Each structure stands twice: as C-alpha cells, then as structure tokens.
Image (tube, coloured by chain):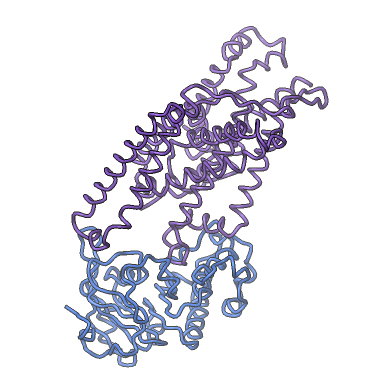
Amino acid sequence: MTNAAVLPTNSLGIVHADDAQLQVSGLNVFYGESHILRDVDLTVPGGKMVCLIGRNGVGKTTLLKTVMGLLRQRSGRVTFEGQEISALPPHRRAKAHIGYVPQGREIIPQLTVRENLLLGYEALPGGMGRHRHVDPFVYELFPVLESFLERRGGDLSGGQQQQLAIARALLGKPRLLLLDEPTEGIQPSVVLDIERAVRQITATGISVLLVEQHLHFVRQADWYYAMQKGGVVASGPTSELSKAVVDRFLSV
Amino acid sequence: MTSLLDTLFNGLAIGSVLMLAALGLAVVFGLMGVINMAHGELMMLGAYTTYVVQNLLKTGPLQALFPAYILIAIPLAFLVSGLAGLVLEKTVIRRLYGRPLETLLATWGVSLILQQLVRSVSTAFFIGLVLALVLGLGLPRFLPAAWLRQRWSPLLKLGSWLLAGGLGIALAALAGQTRQLRLPWFSARNIEVTAPQWLRGSIEVAGVTMPTGRLFIIALTALSLIAVHWFLQKSVWGIRIRAVTQNRSMSSCLGIPTDKVDALSFLVGSGLAGVAGVAVTLLGSVGPNMGGNYIVDCFMVVVLGGVGKLLGTVVAALGIGILSYVLGSGSLLLLWPQMPAALNSLITFFATTSMAKVLVFMLIVAFLQFRPAGLFPQKGRMVEA
C-alpha cells in the first residue's frame, strides 16, 4: 500500500517524512494466527518526543517490540535514520543506537547493579571490554543507583529497577529511546523523578517513543498517536489532545 | 584416624574426576539448557589427544619434553574438544534450540558418529573426509549467487553435498589402495596412555599414602574450577553469558550478540570436557566407548547440584564421590568394627563399586523426589527459541 514515492502519512495526513528519524510503514504483526498490528504507520521526527496512547491490549507494546526486533512483522517496513532495519536482529538495532526500556524493566536479576549498568555499553563498539567504568552522569540523573551498585538487580524495588533500566539504556548512547510504560506501578515520588529524567533526556536531542497512561506525562510529548484494535486511529500535537480524545483512547 | 583421612582422600580424588567431567556439562546443560549426549565423546577426544601428544613426544626431536607431555596435552585437548563442540553447535545444536527432545536424539547420534570416527579413521579416510567437507562447504561459494536464492536452492545444496560426499568416498577408496594409508590410526581397541614417571609415585602425608596421579587430578580440578569461576564471574564474556542465560531477549536488546555467546559457552563447556579427558587417561582404560561411562554420572552431578549453579556441581560431585567411595570400599566396617551384625551384612552387601553406585543413585532419586530442583536451586534458562 505504501511505496517509496508516497510519503507514509498517518490517517490524518499530518506528519511528513522529511525529518523522520524512525519511520514505520504498513506494519502488520501476528501472534500465531491472531492479527495484532494492522497497517500501522508512525513517524518519530528527530529530537522529538512521541507518545503512543490507547487502552490495554491494543498493540502498543507489540509495536515497540517490533521496532526493537523482538517480533517479526509479516509485512511492512521499519526504517531508522534512512536505513531499513526490518530484517535486523535486536542486537544489531541496539548497535544502530536504538535504546529500549521494556515494560516490566527486564533487569538481569542475578547480576549486580553495576554489571547491569555496564551491560548498557554493549550497544557501543567494543562493548563492556572497552568501557569498564560507568559514566557518572547516570548517578546525577538517578542518585539512588550509586548507593546500590553492589546489590543484585533483582533485589531493587520496582521504581529503582525502572531507573536502572533507563540508565542502562542511556549508557548505550541511543539516538532513539523506546520507553514502555515507565511509570506503571511505581510510587508517585519516583514517577516525578522519572518524568524529570525523561525531560532531561529529550533536552539533549534524543528522540523518545513513549507508551504511557499517565495523562500529564503524555502531555509532555510533542505528538501523540492513539491506537485502537491494532491500528492507529488518531494523531496530532499533544497540545491539541482534547478531553474527548483522552476519554475515548486512554483507560485512565 | 589414618583410615578416615585415607577414605576422605580417595573419595576426594573420585569426586574430583566427577567434578572435572561435570564442569563442562554444568556450562552446557546448566547454563545453556542444552542436553548434550555427546559430552562423553568430547571427553574421549580429549583422551585421544593426550594419546597422540604422548606418541609424538615419545621419540623424535622433542623427546626432552616427554615428561611434561601431559601438561602440553591439557591446552591441546581443550582446543580439540572445544573446536569439535563449536562445530557441533554451529551445525546441529543451533538449529534445535528450544527443542530438547530433538537435541537429545541428535547429539546421541553425534556421539555414535564420533565413536565410529575414532575407530575407523585412517589417513585415507581422513583425506576423503577433508575433501568432502571442503567441497561441501566451498562449492556454494563458486555458484552464481542468484542460484542460491531460488525455490530449488535447497536441492542444489543437497546435490553439492552429495557430489562432495561421493568425491570424498572415491578419493578415500583410491588412497586406501595403499596399505600404509589404509591402516587405522587408533583401531577399535583401547589405547595405552602411560603416565609420565613423576605421576606414578606417591607421597605420604600424616600416614596417608597419596598417589601423585590423584593429587595431580585434584590440583587440575581445582585450577579448572577457579578458572571457570573467574571466567563466568569476572570476565566480560562471562557477564555476557550470565546475562543471556538469565534474560535472552533483553540481552539481545542491549546489543549482546546472543549467537556468539551461545557458541562461546559451548566451546568452553566442550573444551572442559577435553581437559577432563586428559585427567581420565591417568585413571583407567581409554577407548572409543569410554564416553558412556561418564555421561550418566555427569548428568547426575549437574541435576543433583541444581541446574545453573556452579557451587551445586562442586558439592554434588564431591558428595557423590566421597559417598560412593565410602560405601564401595566398605570403609564403614573398618571405622566401626563392632557394629550390629544386621547393619554389618547390609553394608557388606553394598561394598562393591557397582553396588555402591546403585545405592548412591537410589539415594539421589529419593532426594530429587523431595527437592526436584537439586541442592542449590536457581532458575536457569531452559532455552527458548
């Protein structure tokens, strides 16, 4: 349905592809025989923050997993910085500077916090072998991590794990960060920390693709996409995110 | 007192062999979740490497090194078995991740192939095998690339392998005309590995006679254990291996090349089997079938210790070793001469090597009924696709 000559625009036809850093076009993804994503088009412009909203089970996480390469699309393309990455395994996409903070954090439980952080360097050339010390900027972002360096990752609280997961992704110097519900099930004070950190991240020019339910976090994004039943049904600048849209697409 | 120490030393020696043999399996099965039935045959390759090194150094210009041949054999055996394991991973096991039953059957087949390989390999056989492999792997490179992307490409590949195999067999048959080239290298008989002079004596400490050969095995086991522990806990690749073991998909998302990690873990595990093979030459007969004597014990050790835990392997190996020696040698009778007659006859009944093994395995089975995850349970990766 999309070919190279036609700019992949979403259903409202607003986003143009010129400044696109990540571009998803005509994406169809299946779990076995069940059709999860239906012809999804989405664009993340360089240095912007884009938010995916929608009720549970509409395919937001599936979309992020497909962008990261954990799931294979049946049709459609994923392009990052002009390169098609649809066929690459996840570790090659990480090395192309896409950082991923999954739902449920996915900290390596038996490794120490320090080792978990060092794993973030694996996305850089030379990996942990060349980068043996954690860059202290992550401790400025999340001071709590520095005091827990020798603890096991699995022993941290949910909020601390979330901070660790974000810090780990940042150490790989991503140019696009995929954040899947970073505030889900986390105490309010830590939510504020995380929101502040994400603001600082976007200020440094890293683009962010965010899946989020908290409305005031959503409002920090530049652009929103609303999903329903596996497809993108609405999008626009978050400043124009009206109450009616929120009620229709956000479960909170 | 002396007999107690004596018993402990001999049990420790038996446990060390078990531990060394199971260490490689603890990496391959414990960490990666791959059931490798050919592990015993990788040990056998290590033992045959020792034999070859011994024969090469026995005469000729390097004779001066002969007393140290076993030290030279250790790294070589690691390499030979490790590379064999690497080839096995790249060709067979990689395609079967997440399918334990198929892996079990396929690696069992590989173990039979390896056994027959050392029985029948001769110079003619070897030349033919090398030709077939080089042709089979190299032919597709000379074909036009477009031919390999057609629907019938698999048929083309099959055809090129058939051709390569046929040419290899033809060359082997041709070379076999010469008697010199037809002679098998090892034959199906057991081979003779003689320990160097300095491993045949014994030293006495506190009234306990310790054969130096056994002391050597204990030292080799301790060194291997320290090396594996360091590798897994401190080295960069060790951290990668542990990360992939615990969370494969997230590790990949962080940029860790999981296929390389799999290959490396398999190489290390198989190489350790080779080192164990070197140690085994000091103890008993070395032949094409020796792998089968060890594989069951190795799996027992890893399962009893708790899959995925090195400490479990250590404790389980020493425990099984000491227990089977204590039971098998009837040392309990010596330690406690005036025990009741009923107990005495029971212990005498189990006081042979094979009956002791029966009893130990029965105890393990009973133990696993209550603690199915072993002594030190941890969630390991049962490999997902």
Examine the image and state in which quarter residue A116 appears. Answer: bottom right
Compare residues B281 and B122 and report the one nearer the observer.
Answer: B122
* Hue used for the chain lettered A: blue
Q: In the image as oriented, which residue stretches furthest toward the top? A: B341
- Report whether residue A195 is seen: yes
Q: Which chain is purple?
A: B
Instruction: Tell me if A139 is positioned left or right of B304 in this view.
Output: right
Return the residue found at the far front.
B178
**In the depicted view, which residue is nearer to us: B196 or A64?**
B196
Tell me the residue at 37%/65% (across/down): A89
The quadrant in which the N terminus of chain B is found is top right
Residue drawn at point x = 49 percent, y = 83 percent: A201
Q: Is residue B376 above or below residue A154?
A: above
Question: Residue B253, how many percent across, how many down?
Answer: 43, 66
Residue B338, located in which quarter of the rendered image? top right
List x then y, in percent, for residue A209. 38, 79
Could you tell me which residue is drawn at 45 percent across and 83 percent down?
A206
Front-lying residue, B324 or B111: B111
Q: Taking A133 as reference, is B199 above or below it?
A: above
Up the image or down, B246 lies above or below A199; here it is above
Q: Position of residue A226 (x, y in %)?
A: 27, 80
Q: Residue furthest bottom?
A: A239
Q: Residue furthest left?
A: A1
Q: Nearer the viewer, residue B122 or B384?
A: B122
Question: Is B175 on the left-hand or right-hand side of A2?
Answer: right
Q: Disc count in the image? A: 0
Q: Position of residue A247 (x, y in %)?
A: 27, 82
Q: Is residue A51 visible?
A: no
